[in-house]
């Protein structure tokens, strides 16, 4: 038997139910993956609440995991029994063992432990798409990142700084400012204090906004004419866009899901290699990985929504 967390109804964290199941043999094009770590991302809460559609219930949410292949179905090329692999957005992740399309899998380097892999893949590939495809950050540019201590922001901000940009991290409070500085960010400001207008007095080339409504007016005000505004998230609710003002200022507005920047397998593998290389080179600093057992998924969601400090929340197989 294998543990799984199922969703029978939408609602709060308490609707996540841990059960046992028997996982069958992989079909054509599939493998059976014995998972060693499962990523928990804020988007999972949207599927749990029904904000994003899940399809028919019951269902298994979560889209990110890593583990070892323990069975290979027919018509599978490039994946073998015993391979260590991960994936970044394939529904059905909250399970100890699962069936998954071989084409969705990303080989894991030998030096990357499974918990670190799932702390990196979805968030790191999102950051890669922003820095390499939405706006290719150049040395000397000024970049503003809201939610700089969040899952994506804590990777995106130090990575942009490593690429030679002047990065300003906008955070919600003084304790978050300390956490942002611990990432190695040189310019950290607290929202609502007036610090941003002073720090960004020369104007900002690109705003990567993961917060939305709570800080949007303050952040968009420091964009220079012709800048890029990337709406990569809205943790506090959708921002109020003054489209006429943005057009007048010639600000390019983008809002794209991660997969649009990874149109084929070659691009996906190259991007993943770059994410792992940045991790290996210490670009992201020392990242805390907060772990829970699979049957503690409800508590993991409570802590995620409460913004408990820690850049990554990861589920491990088994019972607490």
Image (cartoon, rainbow, N blue to C red):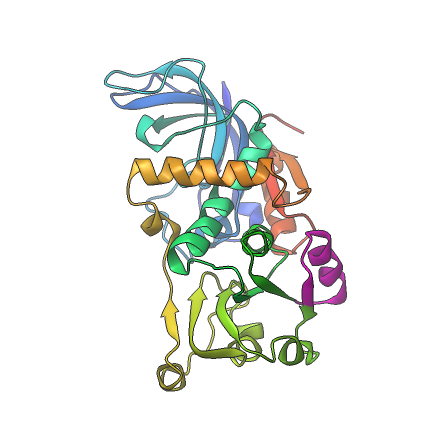
Residue 48 visible in image: no
Extent of the magenta region: 171-188
Viewer-side residue, 318 vs 255? 255
Reply yes or no: does residue 86 show up in magenta. Answer: no
Establish if 292 lies above or below 231: above
Q: Position of residue 193 (x, y in %)?
A: 71, 78
Q: Position of residue 313 (x, y in %)?
A: 61, 42
| Residue depicted at 48% across the width and 59% down the height | 138
In the displayed structure image, the side of residue 207 where residue 134 appears, left or right: left
Q: Position of residue 41 (x, y in %)?
A: 52, 47
Establish if 50 lies above or below 195: above
- The residue lying furthest to the front in this view is 140
Establish if 171 lies above or below 108: below
| Residue depicted at 37% across the width and 80% down the height | 250
Q: Quarter of the image containing the C terminus?
A: top right
Establish if 50 lies above or below 229: above
Reply yes or no: does residue 176 show up in magenta. Answer: yes
Q: Position of residue 299 (x, y in %)?
A: 64, 44
In the displayed structure image, the side of residue 122 where residue 161 appears, left or right: right
**Number of marks in picture:** 0
Residue 212 visible in image: yes
Viewer-side residue, 289 vs 181? 181
């Amino acid at each position: 038997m294998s543990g799984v967390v199922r969703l029978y109804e939408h609602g709060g964290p308490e609707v996540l139910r841990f059960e046992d199941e028997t996982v069958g043999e992989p079909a054509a094009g599939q493998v059976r993956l014995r998972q060693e770590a499962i990523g928990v991302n804020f988007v999972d809460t949207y599927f749990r609440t029904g904000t994003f559609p899940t399809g028919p219930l019951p269902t298994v949410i979560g889209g990110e995991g890593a583990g070892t292949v323990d069975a290979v179905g027919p018509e599978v090329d490039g994946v073998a029994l015993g391979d260590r692999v991960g994936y970044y957005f394939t529904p059905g992740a909250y399970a100890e063992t699962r069936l998954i399309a071989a084409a969705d899998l990303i080989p894991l380097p030998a030096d990357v432990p499974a918990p670190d892999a799932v702390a990196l893949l979805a968030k790191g590939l999102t950051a890669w798409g922003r820095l390499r495809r939405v706006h290719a950050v150049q040395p000397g540019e000024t970049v503003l990142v809201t939610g700089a201590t969040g899952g994506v922001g804590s990777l995106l901000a130090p990575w942009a700084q490593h690429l030679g940009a002047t990065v300003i991290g906008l955070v919600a409070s003084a304790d978050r400012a300390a956490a942002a500085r611990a990432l190695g960010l040189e310019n950290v400001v607290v929202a609502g204090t007036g610090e941003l207008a002073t720090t960004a007095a020369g104007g900002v080339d690109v705003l990567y906004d993961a917060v939305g409504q709570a800080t949007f007016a303050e952040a968009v005000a420091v964009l220079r004419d012709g800048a890029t505004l990337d709406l990569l998230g809205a943790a506090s609710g959708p921002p109020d866009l003054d489209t006429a003002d943005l057009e007048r200022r010639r600000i390019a507005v983008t809002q794209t899901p991660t997969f649009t920047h990874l149109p084929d397998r070659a691009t996906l593998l190259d991007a993943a290699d770059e994410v792992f290389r940045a991790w290996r080179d210490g670009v992201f600093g020392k990242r805390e990985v907060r772990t829970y057992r699979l049957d503690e998924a409800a508590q993991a969601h409570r802590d995620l929504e409460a913004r408990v400090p820690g850049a990554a929340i990861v589920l491990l197989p088994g019972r607490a």
